[in-house]
Each structure stands twice: as C-alpha cells, then as structure tokens.
Image (spheres, helix red, strand yellow):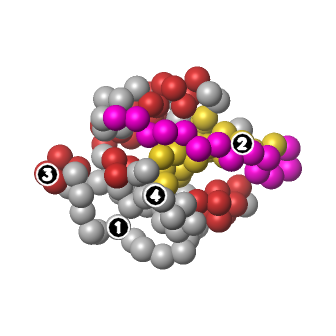
Amino acid sequence: MKIVVPVNKENKISEHFGQSENFNVFTVSEGNKVSNIKSVAKGHGCGCKSGVSSELSSDGVTVMLAGGIGGGAVKSFMGSGIEVLRGCSGDAGEVVSMYLSGQIEDRGSSCSKHQEHHHHDEHQHGHSCCHN
C-alpha cells in the first residue's frame, strides 16, 4: 500500500492542498509498517488539472491524507482510484501512523473557498487529524 500526503516545508500536512510544497509518498509493508518515504515534486497547476492524481495512482498510491482540498481535486484523485481523507493536520509521519492504526476517518470537508481566493484560515490546527 502507498499513502500520499501533501506537505509543507516543515513536513506538516499542508492546510491547503494547492499550497503544499511537495508530496510525501509512504510505502507500507506487511504489518502496517512504513518501509519507505519518497518526496515527490508537486508540479504546477491545481490538483484538478495537473495530472498528478494519475501519476500517483500509476505509482501505486491508493490513499491520500489531506488537510483542505477543493472539490475538483478530490474528484480527480477519486477518479484515479485514490481515496481522499480530508481534514487532517499535523506531522505527516504521525498522521500516517494514526491512519494505519485505524484512528483516521474522512471529515468530509473540502475547501469551500477554493474557487474564491485559493487560500483560507478555516482549517483545524494541531497535532493530529480526523480522529474516530
């Protein structure tokens, strides 16, 4: 299994998908242990138009743990077979570990202001995300 997380330069989950520095791709081996972490350049354009969803899907990614993300990007990733869990925040590695232990669920909150300004301040801040 591979999990992608859009991150900022501090390796925290980006509050807004479109403002992430890059993507960390976590490869998970048997026993739900992270065996490899690869940084992938974000590329240009928004998630709904950049083609990154099909590239990540081709690389074997099946799950994205994201903060705020627009509906078009969610649709693009889901159309490429990548499940998107929204509303996450905190250290990327710690959130992946929480997901692997069953503590993460989708908050169902896309970025409602994506079309207006491409930025916002309404995301949850803190160390973790989307607790069951």
Mark 2: secondary structure: strand
Q: Residue at x 39, y 71 (%)?
A: 124
Tell me, yes or no, whether the highlighted magenta stretch contains residue 36: yes
Q: Quadrant of residue 36?
A: top right
Circle 1 packing at 10 Å, graded few (<14), some (14-19), many (20+), is: some
Q: Determine whether 45 is above or below 32 in the image.
A: above
Q: Residue at x 34, y 35 (%)?
A: 44
Mark 3: secondary structure: helix
Earlier-in-chain disc, 4 versus 2 = 4
Mark 4: secondary structure: loop
Mark 3 is on which residue type?
A: Glu
Q: Determine whether 97 is above or below 37 in the image.
A: below
Mark 4 and mark 1: Cα distance apart in space? 15 Å
Earlier-in-chain disc, 3 versus 1 = 3
Mark 2 is on which residue type?
A: Thr
Circle 4 packing at 10 Å, graded few (<14), some (14-19), many (20+), is: many
Q: Which residue is mark 3?
A: 116
Q: Quadrant of residue 97?
A: bottom right
Mark 3 and mark 1: Cα distance apart in space? 16 Å
Q: Which residue is mark 4?
A: 8
Q: Position of residue 34 (x, y in %)?
A: 76, 51
Mark 1 and mark 2: Cα distance apart in space? 27 Å
Circle 3 packing at 10 Å, graded few (<14), some (14-19), many (20+), is: few
Q: Which residue is mark 1?
A: 123
Quarter of the picture holding the N terminus: top right
Badge 4 vs badge 3, beta-carbon distance below 8 Å: no
Mark 1: secondary structure: loop
Earlier-in-chain disc, 4 versus 3 = 4
Q: Which residues are magenta?
A: 30-44
Mark 1 is on which residue type?
A: His
Mark 3 and mark 2: Cα distance apart in space? 35 Å
Q: Determine whether 81 is above or below 18 in the image.
A: above
